[in-house]
Amino acid sequence: MKKILVFLAFCFALYAEENATLEQNVSQNLQNSELIKEISNLDNSLKNNIWITRYANYNTYQKLLDELEQNENELKKLDKGSKRGGDLIKRSQTLKEQINLLKEYEKTPFSNMLAAPEMENPPRINSPVALVSGFSYIKKIRSDKIEYQRHIKELDTLLEKLEAKENLLNRLNLIDDSEQNRASLNLAKQEIGDFKAAKQIADTTYSVYEKRADEAVNMTTSDIKAQFLSMGYTAIVILLTIGLTFIAKFIVKRTITDNERFYTVNKFLNVLNITVIIIILLFSYIENVTYLVTVLGFASAGIAIAMKDMFMSMLGWMVIMFGGTIHVGDRVRVYHDGSEFVGDVIDISLLRLTVFEDVSYSTYKTNRRAGRIIFVPNNYIFTDLIANYSHYGMKTVWDGIDVVISFDSNHKKAAYLAKNIVKKYSKGYTDIAKRQMNKLRSQYSIKNPNVEPRIYTFFEPYGINISCWFMSNSYATLALRSTISAEIIEAFLAHDDIKIAYPTQTMFIGKKETPSDHVAHAEQEGENI
C-alpha cells in the first residue's frame, strides 16, 4: 500500500512538472512572437530611411566585391573554355557592371550625407541691386543649414530605433538563443557602431560648418545694413538737392516776370538738378570712377555708330542751348523731305524740339491742317533747314502780296494806291521793326536795315504784277495779309482804269480784230457772265 502511495505521488509530481514546462514554453513562444513583431515593425519604419538605404547599398557593394573576388579566384582554377568557366566570366561581367553603378560607395557609405554643403564666398553688397543677391545668399545658407540639421536629426532618430531593435534582439536571444538571432544581434550592433561613428563625424562637420555659415551670414547682414545706411544718406542728399531746386524755382517764379526767361531758368534748374543727382549716384555706388571712364571710352566708338542720330541730337541740343539760335516761344519753319511746318517752339529737350503748328501761310497753301504737335529731332539743325521768324527778339517778318492788273490798266495809280494801303495798315509793325533792326545790327552785320513798305511792278504773261512787301507780325501774318488784300481789291475796283487780271482764253471766229477790239470784246463777255 505504501508503495502504491509513493508511486501515485511520483506520478502527480511528474505531471505537475510537465504542465509547468508546457505553460512556460507557451509563454516563451508568445513573448518570442511579440518581440519578432516589434522588430518587424521597426524594420518597416526604417525601410525608406535614406541612411539605411545608403548603408544597405554600401553592404551590397562590399558583397559584390567579395563575390567578384571569389569568381576571379575560381576562374583561375578552371578552363575558360569550359561551360563553368563561361558562366563565371558572364557572372564577373555582371558583377563589374553592378559595382560600377555603386562606385560612390567604394570608401564610405555616407560620404555625400556627411559632407557639409558647399558655401560660396559672401557677395559684395556695393549697390542697391546687390541687396537681392545678399538676401538670396543668406536664404540659401540658412536653407542648407536647416537641411543639414534635418539629416543629423534623421540620424539621431535612426540610432534610437536601432538601439531599441538591439534591446529587442537581446531579449529575444534570452528567450531563443538561436544562431539566427545571434547573427541578427551582431548585425544590429555593427550597424549601431557604424552609425555612431557617422554621427560623430556629422556632429564635428556640422559644428565647423555652422561657425562658417554664421560668419558668412553675419558678414552679409553687416554689408546689407551698411548698404541700407548708405542708401539712406544718399536719399537724404538727393532730397536736399530736390528741395533746394524747388526753393530756387520758387524764388525764380517770384522774381522773374518774363515767361520766356522763367521757362529757360526753370529748364536749366531741372537739368542741373538731374545732373547733380546722377553725379551723387555715381560717386555713391561706383567705387572706381576711372574704370568706368575707361570702359565708356572703349565702348563710345561702337555706341556712337549704333546711336549716331541720338548723339547728333544731343550735340544739336548743345548747339541750340549754348548757341542761342532757337529759344522756347520762337516762331520757326521746319523743312524736311518736302514737308513744311510752321509753328511755335513749346519745348526744347535733350533729343528734340517740340513745335506747336499754328495757322500760317504754309498751312493755307500746303498742309491744310494745323494744331498738331510736331517733334523735330535736334540733329535736323545740321542737315535740314530750320528758319527762325523771331530770332534775337524779332517780332516782325517780311510778308508780300501780289496783285496782277491788266496791261491797259493805270499801273502807276495802282502802285500808288497799294503803297498807301500797305503803309497805313503796316505802320505799327514798321515802327517795331525799326527798333528791333537797330538792336539786331549790334549783333549782326546787316547791309540794308530799311524796313519801310516796298512796292514793285513786274511784267507777267497775263498782266502787270504789283508786288507789295511790308512788315507783319511774325506770329499772325495771315491777319494783316487778309486785311491789306481786301483793302487793295476794294481800292482797285473803285477805279475804272484799274482792272484786276486773271488767266483767260478767248476764241475769235471771223475777221481779224485789233488789240483794243479784243479787250473790249473780253470785257463784254465778262459783263454777260
Image (cartoon, rainbow, N blue to C red):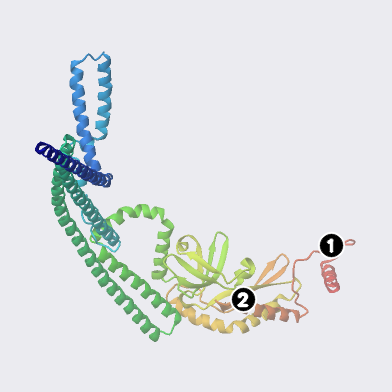
Image coords of residue 119 (percent x, y): 21, 52
Q: Is residue 420 above or below residue 48?
A: below
Residue at figure coordinates x 76%, y 72% from the top left: 408
Q: Amino acid at mark 1?
A: Met
User: Residue reaching furthest left?
Assistant: 2
- Residue 385 in view here: yes
Q: Amino acid at mark 2?
A: Leu
Q: Nearer the viewer, residue 118 or 249?
A: 118
User: Residue reaching furthest right?
Assistant: 510
Q: Is residue 270 above or below residue 288?
A: below
Q: Is residue 11 above or below residue 403?
A: above
Image coords of residue 415 (percent x, y): 67, 77
Image coords of residue 190 (percent x, y): 14, 40
Q: CA–CA distance between discs 1 and 2?
A: 38 Å
Label 1 crowd (10 A; few <14 / some 14-19 / many >=20): few
Q: Which mark is residue 507?
A: 1
Residue at figure coordinates x 47%, y 62% from the top left: 380
Q: Which residue is mark 2?
A: 478
User: Residue reaching furthest bottom?
Assistant: 254
- Per the image, label 1 sits on a secondary structure element best described as loop
Q: Nearer the viewer, residue 327 or 158?
A: 158
Label 2 crowd (10 A; few <14 / some 14-19 / many >=20): some
Q: Is residue 335 above or below residue 155?
A: below
The quadrant in which the C terminus is found is: bottom right
Picture quadrant where residue 500 is located? bottom right
Image coords of residue 319 (percent x, y): 40, 66
Q: Nearer the viewer, residue 262 or 48?
A: 48
